[in-house]
Image (cartoon, helix red, strand yellow):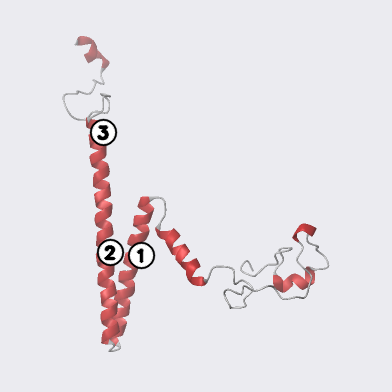
Amino acid sequence: MATKKKCRACGHQLSLHAQFVESVQAPNGYAAPASGAPAPTDSASGTGHHNASRPGFLSRTYRRIHTFYTHPDAATRRKRRFGTAIGLVVFGVIGSIGNFADGELGAGFAGLAMAVGGVIWALREMAATKRTRDAEVIDRAQQQHHSSDPNRQLYGEYQPPNLNSDEDETR
């Protein structure tokens, strides 16, 4: 029931709207026009559809895909691309096996090419993830090495303090 269209004036489902129109009145500022005239159409689109001003299916789908793959967090973007590459491999392998079994060689090779492309994409994503992790480790080591705080330095002549306070007094 959550996916049913609702009235913009009062919020009831359109299929149930006739039952509630007398019992619930919409606020005056939000009241729907009561005229029997059809809704204006967008003459530029030529479709005559009442939602012609809304973006089409392809542009909405492109926007969703673009939002999915351009997440602000780089690790999330990598995980999503890697998951898509694995999905492409699985889809290509299943499709190629089914098409080869049916004797469709062209479609079988197309599925095999998709699987190989997905494997290459997944390997590239794994290599990019490894390069990013290696760069983070190198940066952290450089920061520790060049730090002026003796508690952060791990290289050079620094000796950690003794944990036994009796030994410190004898020195």
- Left or right: residue 15 versus residue 75 is right
Q: Residues within 10 Å of mark 3 (few under 14, many from 20)?
A: few
Q: Amino acid at mark 3?
A: Gln
The answer to the question of whether label 1 and label 3 lie on touching residues, with beta carbons closer than 8 A, is no
Above or below, 169 against 55 in this view is above
**Sequence-wise, which precedes: disc 2 or disc 1?**
1
**Sequence-wise, which precedes: disc 3 or disc 2?**
2
Q: Which of these two is toward me, 50 or 135? A: 50
Tell me the CA gap for discs 2 and 1: 9 Å
- Number of numbered markers: 3
Residue that appears at 62% across and 76% down: 49
Q: Which residue is mark 2?
A: 121
Residue at the top extreme of this rendering: 170
Q: Which residue is mark 3?
A: 143
Residue that appears at 28% across and 72% down: 115
Q: Which residue is mark 1?
A: 84
The answer to the question of whether label 2 and label 1 lie on touching residues, with beta carbons closer than 8 A, is yes
Helix, strand or loop at mark 2: helix
- Left or right: residue 13 versus residue 77 is right
